[in-house]
Image (tube, rainbow, N blue to C red):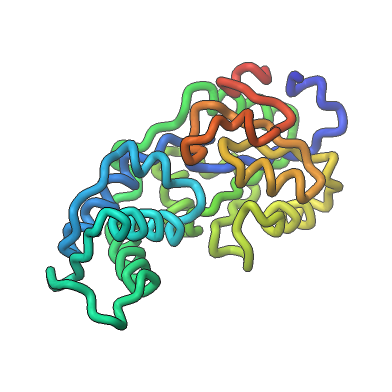
Amino acid sequence: MKLAELRDLRAVFFDLDGTLVDSAIDIYHAMNAALATLGRPAVSEAQVRCWVGRGAPQLAYCVIKHQHEQGITTTVHGSRPQAHDSLQEQQHQLLEAFLNHYERHVCVESRIYAGVEAFIQACQNQNLKLACITNKPYQPAHDLLQALDLLSPFHLLLGGDSVTHKKPHPMSLQHALHCFELEPHQALMIGDSRNDVEAAHAAGMQCVALTYGYNHGEPVADCNPDLVLDSLQQLL
């Protein structure tokens, strides 16, 4: 498959984290800053890279669940949780602290993956509509793209809080198709995880999966995408 050979193609939808941008390092730093605020021990970058990609609430849940399984029960005051301190409440505390840190430091060490800018330019040369569809909340997604000078090519940006259901639900992709007045076969989804593949297929779209991103420790080829690539340059 080559971009120029996709004759019916009118739009390309991209995931953000793990697809366009390697953002895990800044997410990792923000998560550990949040954990320190709450008196909890740090997690590793490798753990964060395994847990990211399903939205900030799920990331916070993975951290709390892991620490609970490890017998770590420290709360914001450094004491054992009370009966009413459920895992859900601890997750909410961590999520709030994480977003507070991350939204102020969204792009310190995050970098655009090799091949992304050339591919986006090729899409623009073919007058394709471009959408970025992520489970990251809209504002930090906007700020990250803007900080990397990668916002302007996109005609549409949808965050995890832009629609009712996040990927792998197809709602955000269906919304983008509706905005561009396109049929599913006229758009291509590019992502790095099972969420992207399942959302695309549920929306009736083809999905290209990239091997370098974040897929929760699972080879992305096992998710049955229509094409697996090591770099977007392979589509040029």
Towards the viewer: 63 or 73: 73
Towards the viewer: 108 or 17: 17
Residue 188 lies in quadrant: top right
Which residue extends farthest left?
78
The answer to whether residue 146 of the structure is visible from this angle is no
If the image is split into quadrants, where does the N terminus sit?
top right
Q: Position of residue 217 (x, y in %)?
A: 47, 36
Q: How many marks?
A: 0
Quick check: 164 above or below 103? below
The answer to whether residue 42 of the structure is visible from this angle is yes
If the image is split into quadrants, where does the C terminus sit?
top right
Q: For the point 65% across and 36% down, which residue is it?
A: 223
Quick check: 54 above or below 235? below
Q: For the point 29% across and 52% down, which residue is it?
A: 31
Q: Position of residue 51 (x, y in %)?
A: 42, 46
Q: Position of residue 80 (x, y in %)?
A: 17, 72
Q: Position of residue 195 (x, y in %)?
A: 61, 46
Towards the viewer: 121 or 2: 2
Q: For the point 42% across and 51% down, which residue is it?
A: 143
Residue 107 lies in quadrant: top left
Q: Is residue 84 left or right of residue 232?
A: left
Q: For the point 30% across and 45% down, which residue is it?
A: 28
